[in-house]
Amino acid sequence: MENIKKIVGIEAAKFVKDGMIVGLGTGSTAAFFVEELGRRVAQENLQITGVTTSSVTSEQAKRLGIALKDIDDVAYIDLTVDGADEVDLDLNGIKGGGAALLMEKIVATYSKDYIWIADDSKMVKHLGAFPLPVEVVTFGSGQVFRLFETLGFNPRLRVDANDVAVVTDMGNYIIDLHMKEIKEPQRLAKLLDETVGVVEHGLFNDMVKTVIVGSADGNVKII
Ligand code: 5RP
């Protein structure tokens, strides 16, 4: 599995050219992309500026010597490469397994080009087997949780190994919706967008145009 992630990470890095402002995704797959960019910066004198999607990725990029800028200090982002938790046939996706969905969605929104990298186990007919992360402000999060229960969304507050609520880089909680199948992602996204207390959700509908998918036999497909 790690090998597939590495292959798609390296493949995605080929889309990065000198002078680009690059959105750096979060997660174990995106980490291989960032690693490859770091290698090219060090060995090939690649000149890029990174805009990161989490504190973890910021730390990795700094370690690798990739120059970084805050999202507000760039006019736009040329290309963002990120991982995904699930991708359906229309290239709608679920993200946020690594709790970075808010920063990831903001960086993606202000990117001219946006690519996902994934192994083929993430490609699904319908979204929803992977629990949908929803980022909520801490104030009133219990009310939002109960609303999700009433709606039959089967919510669970995300906790760490010590059973303490996970707090995102933006200071919010994550409620994961165990819905099993999301038949109408656009409709669910609208409902979540309109729910007071929800900061952002992990449905990334119609955002990506290219997905680089790797399989165990070493094959890479660009969809
Ligand atoms: C983090 C994300 C990740 O991109 C997603 O969870 C995929 O991670 P991985 O590559 O480790 O499977 O959305 O918030």
Image (spheres, rainbow, N blue to C red):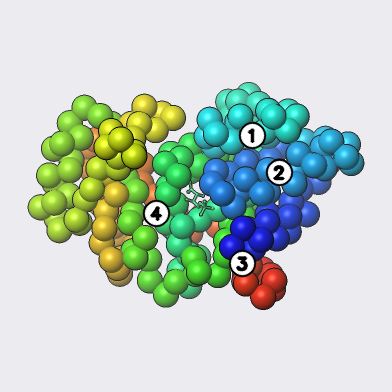
Q: Position of residue 219 (x, y in %)?
A: 69, 73
Circle 2 Cα neighbour tier, 10 Å, few/some/many (<14 / 14–19 / ≥20): many
Q: Position of residue 59 (x, y in %)?
A: 61, 29
Of callouts 3 and 2, which one flags the residue occurring earlier in the amino acid sequence?
2
Of callouts 4 and 1, which one flags the residue occurring earlier in the amino acid sequence?
1
Circle 3 Cα neighbour tier, 10 Å, few/some/many (<14 / 14–19 / ≥20): many
Q: Quadrant of the C terminus?
A: bottom right
| Front position among marks 4 and 1 | 1
**Is the residue under label 2 in contact with that under label 4 (CB below 8 Å)?**
no
Tag on residue 213? Answer: 3
Secondary structure at numbered mark 1 = helix
Q: In this figure, what is the number of numbered marks? A: 4
**Type of amino acid under label 1:** Gln
Of callouts 2 and 1, which one flags the residue occurring earlier in the amino acid sequence?
2
Q: Name the one closer to the observer, 74 or 131.
A: 131
User: How much space separates mark 4 and mark 1, taking CA atoms?
Assistant: 26 Å
| Among the 4 quarters of the image, the one containing residue 162 | top left
Q: Which residue is mark 1?
A: 60
Tag on residue 203? Answer: 4
Q: Quadrant of the N terminus?
A: bottom right
